[in-house]
Image: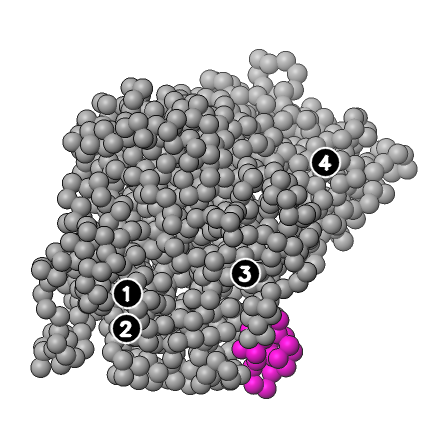
């Protein structure tokens, strides 16, 4: 589409069972009761002048521009604050109104710079539009009086500027920060003529304030007061394309607003069903990595990892790779080959990678990075409910009365959904947070968790079982729901188990590290507080009992009857953008798409008929098993699309050993990532801006990803995989990802009704999309569970074998931060580094004092696996005995410290519990120096000097 | 075969057994879990080392898997995935 502003109906949509009919300038309109006159007028195609109103904020009634006349009413009420009434006759354009509005505009413009032609918002400014709409031709007051035109701009934020000389004090930015984002960083300072927008204290700039750079204020601003620096530099966009963000599992949709092949800005799409017009600092602003100078655009090969890379043509790279694959298969057998599907790439790309491995390599050795994040979700929810996915849509939170958030830090990991949670919490919903750290959700403006249970890392199962004990033994179980919806015998077996004294809060409290009465209080609140919804993240799954914890969560939802309707449910917050999709696409070594086991002959027959090759009926290797097999000399070649396992996977030294033992590592990525240090073939990848496809978010929502610019490397990733498949002898002839989706739909019952035509028309679809649910399934398990009866599973607490002791007395847990994403490959190549330029170690004041440490000191972080150095931050956000860090920076390589302990059911690594010691340090460890030297050597490119040559730093 | 891998697989089998001990038929559950998620080669490694290092439930599960197994292809010549469905 060409460039035009998103429609703005002035005030938010109202939901009501009652409809009201009224007349706007004689035009009949019927709207839900409670709708404002302004919105009703907009729905008829009219446009009442406005400045302080916008449809994602509550009406405010301050600008006095939207005045109307209504038959039978005195004066000129503001249309933004006046609800429609039956039969109401509204007049929006009269001589009286014209005069009033013109007078209001005259006052605004008397204190506004008249530099429209050189203003960055020229022709994209609501103030300018409204001046035109009211017919303003002159300003009688002159410009010589006291004014704000000399105010200095605040350019501290890397992505947007604040120019107070252009501010009309409409408060839209302040309200957006309050209502949409929920940070409340902005305020109107002063009164009357002195009123001005302020980011906190007088001494604060936007950068130093509590502002989280979500961009809501920038989107809300009707002038050039808050504006993207990119717009100032490039100019007004000339076209826009709706696409889906490639960061976290919320799956925000954006309008990529373009000038030629250049992105001017990414603006959250108001019709996006996942984000409802909101965004975070990553999706909104951190897309500059797509044009980063370190992107590799030419294929490269080398004989060994000691040699510099050699740039070659696509033809040579692909034929060389195919020869290597064939050689290794002939020499070592098909099971010496494997592949890794990316959770950052599209469904179609993931489907092709697993198809290449199964049909081309002839093995089921394919896995995805969900292995190291949400594989326990797949196992746990399939076992208990019958489907490897969350049960709700995001809108469901609007009807939640109690939220139980465990092992998730949504304000940092899933910020756009966190804003929706906070909005509901500010309206009175109750909150239980189970987390070793005091996350921002525990206490933030107008929000205070009713219970924060700061458990000892590794005791999730114990605390959830203790809560179940309280619910069962105090008679709070929803027996009617259980009898109707669940297997009663299994429930009784489970209830007997949880009722045992050894599962009581009092017995387990010393293990968990939380007072028994707090556990009892939280359990009672969850069971009796109305609609209870559970939200969880990697703090649940990345444990040796990750799958048990997911099943304990499912037990808790079933025993309280919190499944099958709005406001309740089990909601895994997915880490990467397409974790759900990658899992759906058959990326696990034991399952074909739609979570059907490879041993099922009928399923295999479907795929064999479509693909024309036999499918191995035995499961393949998981990622950790591949690395083990490699060090054993049995696994030799790996095709890795869009993952950096050397940085993201645990026990870095073991990953290095596994990769080093392979004869052909093929990395298909944007940058020479850490894994590429051990690669023999590098195939340049394309960004989400350069490809077509679909992502599936945490609510099972399949959304289009649209190509907004041509791929700088020449090919979309699905095309690269197709060319590789052709090189190894497969006859693939897809001309567009829609054809791949058609194949997915033919082979996958839950995707049966999905196709690009419908996605284009409807914006998104939530699987399953079947004959029984032709419009998709926002909420699952409504009348019955997918598996039939819900299954209660006994989840006995088994302590992790990773134990603290005299040498390693502290527990390390890891996580992420708002401004960075995963291994940081994207966000580290953007201005987001101003907020987080290095990984820091959070340590409690007591533990710091015992070691003579203060904030900013270098410390050595050592475990049984390895050691690294980083700087300390002393904070009581973590409990005594617990330390915390992020894993965004390869210079730290936090995963050299994590162990190879993993979830019993899925081998998801136990990132969240590592016994460590902290000691003062004065520089990098020997291992870090060796690693850095190897990385530098490995990144050499023959004939190229500079950043990608010998001087290339460690990413 | 690496002793380290065999040791790790035994650890994994024991871990599975510890977490499924409350199932109605724990040995069958452990066997089912391993067959569902492990490659035949991983199972072979565990079978080769016998019951040593295995908890009783895990060891019984491995015995049960072996008892119910179809013999694997004896050579690449009989591997259908190498030569298609026709063994010749």
Could you classify mark 3 by the number of other residues whose Cα lies within 10 Å: few (under 14), some (14-19), or many (20 or more)?
Answer: many
| Residue occupying image coordinates x 60% and y 30% | A445
Task: Specify the subunit that label 4 lies on.
Answer: A
**Share a chain, discs 4 and 2?**
no
Residue on which disc 2 sits:
B1
Q: Is residue A513 rendered magenta in the image?
A: no
| Residue occupying image coordinates x 50% and y 31% | A452
Q: Earlier in the sequence, mark 1 or mark 2?
A: 2
Secondary structure under the numbered disc 1 in the rendered image:
helix
Magenta span: chief secondary structure:
loop
Task: Specify the subunit that label 3 lies on.
Answer: A
Q: Is residue A455 visible?
A: yes
| Residue occupying image coordinates x 18% and y 74% | B81
Q: Which mark is residue B6?
A: 1
Contact between marks 1 and 4 (CB within 8 A): the answer is no
Q: Which mark is residue A867?
A: 3
Q: Quote the CA–CA distance across marks 3 and 2.
A: 29 Å
Q: As displayed, is residue A482 above or below residue A863?
A: above
Q: Quote the CA–CA distance across marks 1 and 4.
A: 60 Å
Residue on which disc 4 sits:
A200
Contact between marks 3 and 1 (CB within 8 A): the answer is no
Q: Nearer the viewer, residue B37 or A613?
A: B37
Task: Specify the subunit that label 1 lies on.
Answer: B
x then y, percent, for residue A293: 61, 70
Could you classify mark 1 by the number of other residues whose Cα lies within 10 Å: few (under 14), some (14-19), or many (20 or more)?
Answer: many
Between label 1 and label 4, give the one nearer the viewer: 1
x then y, percent, for residue A67: 64, 25
**Share a chain, discs 1 and 4?**
no
Report the magenta residues as a range.
Answer: A935-955
Query: The C terminus of chain A lies in which quarter of the figure?
Result: bottom right
Contact between marks 1 and 2 (CB within 8 A): the answer is yes
Could you classify mark 4 by the number of other residues whose Cα lies within 10 Å: few (under 14), some (14-19), or many (20 or more)?
Answer: some
């Amino acid at each position: 589409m060409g460039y035009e502003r998103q429609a703005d109906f002035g005030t938010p949509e109202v939901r009501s069972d009652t409809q009201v009919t009224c007349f706007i300038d004689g035009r009949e309109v019927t709207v839900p009761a409670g709708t404002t006159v302004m919105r009703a007028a907009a729905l008829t195609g009219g446009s009442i002048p406005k400045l302080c109103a916008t449809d994602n904020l509550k009406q405010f009634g301050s600008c006095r521009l939207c005045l109307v006349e209504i038959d039978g009413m005195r004066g000129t009420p503001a249309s933004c604050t006046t609800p429609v009434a039956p039969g109401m006759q509204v007049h929006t354009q009269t001589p009286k109104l014209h005069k009033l509005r013109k007078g209001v505009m005259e006052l605004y413009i008397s204190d506004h710079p008249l530099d429209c032609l050189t203003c960055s918002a020229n022709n994209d400014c609501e103030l300018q539009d409204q001046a035109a709409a009211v017919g303003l031709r002159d300003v009688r007051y002159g410009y010589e009086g006291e004014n704000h035109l000399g105010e200095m701009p605040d350019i501290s934020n890397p992505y947007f500027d604040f120019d107070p000389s252009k501010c009309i004090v409409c408060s839209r930015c302040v309200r957006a920060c309050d209502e949409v984002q929920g940070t409340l960083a902005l305020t109107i300072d002063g009164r009357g003529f002195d009123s001005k927008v302020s980011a906190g204290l007088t001494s604060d700039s936007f950068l130093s304030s509590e502002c989280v750079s979500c961009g809501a204020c920038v989107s809300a601003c009707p002038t050039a007061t808050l504006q993207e620096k990119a717009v100032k530099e490039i100019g007004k966009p000339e076209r826009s394309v709706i696409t889906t963000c490639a960061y976290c599992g919320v799956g925000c949709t954006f309008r990529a607003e373009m000038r030629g092949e250049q992105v001017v800005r990414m603006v959250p799409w108001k019709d996006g069903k996942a984000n409802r017009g909101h965004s975070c600092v990553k999706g909104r602003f951190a897309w500059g990595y797509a044009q980063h100078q370190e992107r590799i655009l030419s294929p490269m090969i080398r004989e060994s990892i000691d040699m510099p890379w050699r740039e070659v043509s696509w033809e040579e790279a692909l034929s060389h790779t195919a020869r290597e694959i064939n050689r290794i298969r002939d020499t070592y057998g098909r099971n010496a080959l494997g592949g890794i599907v990316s959770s950052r790439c599209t469904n179609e790309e993931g489907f092709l990678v697993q198809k290449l491995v199964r049909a081309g390599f002839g093995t089921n050795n394919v896995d995805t990075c969900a292995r190291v994040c949400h594989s326990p979700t797949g196992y746990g929810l399939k076992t208990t409910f019958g489907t490897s996915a969350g049960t709700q849509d995001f809108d469901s939170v609007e009807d939640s009365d109690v939220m139980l958030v465990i092992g998730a830090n949504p304000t940092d990991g899933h910020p756009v959904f966190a804003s929706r949670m906070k909005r509901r919490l500010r309206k009175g919903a109750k909150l239980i947070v189970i987390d070793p750290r005091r996350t921002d959700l525990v206490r933030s403006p107008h929000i205070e968790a009713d219970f924060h249970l700061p458990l000892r890392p590794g005791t999730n199962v114990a605390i959830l079982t203790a809560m179940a004990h309280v619910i069962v033994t105090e008679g709070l179980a929803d027996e009617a729901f259980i009898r109707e919806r669940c297997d009663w015998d299994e429930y009784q077996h489970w209830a007997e188990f949880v009722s045992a004294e050894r599962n009581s809060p009092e017995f387990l409290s010393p293990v968990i590290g939380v007072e028994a009465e707090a556990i009892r209080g939280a359990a009672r609140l969850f069971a009796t507080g109305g609609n209870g919804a559970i939200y969880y993240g990697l703090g649940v799954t990345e444990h040796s009992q990750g799958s048990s914890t997911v099943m304990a969560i499912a037990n808790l939802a079933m025993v309280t009857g919190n499944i099958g309707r709005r406001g309740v449910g089990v909601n895994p917050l997915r880490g990467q953008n397409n974790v759900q999709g990658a899992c759906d696409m058959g990326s696990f070594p034991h399952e074909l798409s739609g979570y059907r086991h490879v041993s099922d002959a009928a399923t295999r027959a479907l795929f064999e008929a479509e693909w024309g090759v036999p499918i191995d009926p035995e499961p393949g290797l998981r990622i950790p098993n591949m690395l083990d097999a490699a060090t054993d000399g049995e696994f030799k070649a790996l095709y890795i699309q869009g993952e950096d396992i050397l940085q993201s996977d645990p026990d870095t030294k073991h990953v290095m050993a596994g990769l080093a033992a392979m004869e052909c590592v093929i990395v298909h990525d944007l940058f020479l990532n850490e894994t590429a240090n051990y690669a023999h073939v590098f195939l340049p990848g394309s960004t989400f801006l350069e490809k077509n496809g679909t992502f599936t978010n945490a609510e099972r929502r399949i959304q289009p990803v649209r190509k907004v610019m041509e791929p700088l490397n020449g090919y979309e990733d699905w095309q690269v995989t197709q060319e590789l498949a052709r090189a190894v002898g497969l006859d693939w002839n897809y001309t567009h990802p829609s054809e791949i989706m058609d194949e997915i739909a033919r082979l996958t019952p839950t995707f049966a009704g999905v196709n690009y035509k419908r996605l284009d028309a409807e914006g998104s679809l939530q699987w399953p999309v079947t004959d029984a649910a032709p419009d998709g399934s926002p909420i699952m398990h409504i009348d019955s569970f997918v598996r039939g009866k819900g299954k209660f599973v006994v989840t006995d607490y088994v302590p992790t074998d990773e134990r603290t002791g005299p040498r390693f007395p502290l527990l390390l847990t890891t996580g992420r931060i708002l401004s960075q994403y995963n291994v940081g490959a994207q966000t580290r190549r953007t201005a987001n580094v101003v907020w987080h330029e290095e990984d820091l170690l959070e340590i409690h004041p007591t533990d710091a004092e015992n070691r003579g440490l203060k904030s900013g000191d270098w410390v050595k972080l050592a475990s049984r696996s390895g050691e690294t150095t980083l700087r300390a931050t002393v904070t009581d956000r973590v409990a005594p005995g617990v330390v915390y860090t992020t894993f965004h920076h390869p210079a730290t390589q936090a995963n050299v410290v994590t162990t190879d302990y993993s979830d019993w059911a899925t081998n998801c690594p136990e990132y969240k519990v590592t016994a460590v010691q902290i000691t003062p340090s004065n520089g990098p460890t020997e291992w870090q120096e060796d690693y850095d030297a190897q990385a530098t050597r490995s990144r050499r490119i023959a004939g190229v000097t500079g950043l990608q040559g010998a001087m290339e730093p460690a990413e | 075969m690496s002793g380290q891998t065999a040791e790790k697989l035994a650890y994994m089998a024991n871990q599975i057994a510890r977490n499924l001990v409350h199932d109605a038929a724990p040995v069958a559950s452990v066997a089912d879990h391993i067959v569902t998620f492990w490659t035949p080669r991983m199972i072979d490694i565990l079978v080769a080392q016998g019951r040593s290092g295995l908890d009783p439930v895990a060891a019984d599960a491995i015995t049960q898997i072996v008892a119910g197994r179809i013999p694997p292809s004896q050579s690449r010549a009989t591997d259908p995935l190498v030569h298609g469905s026709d063994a010749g």
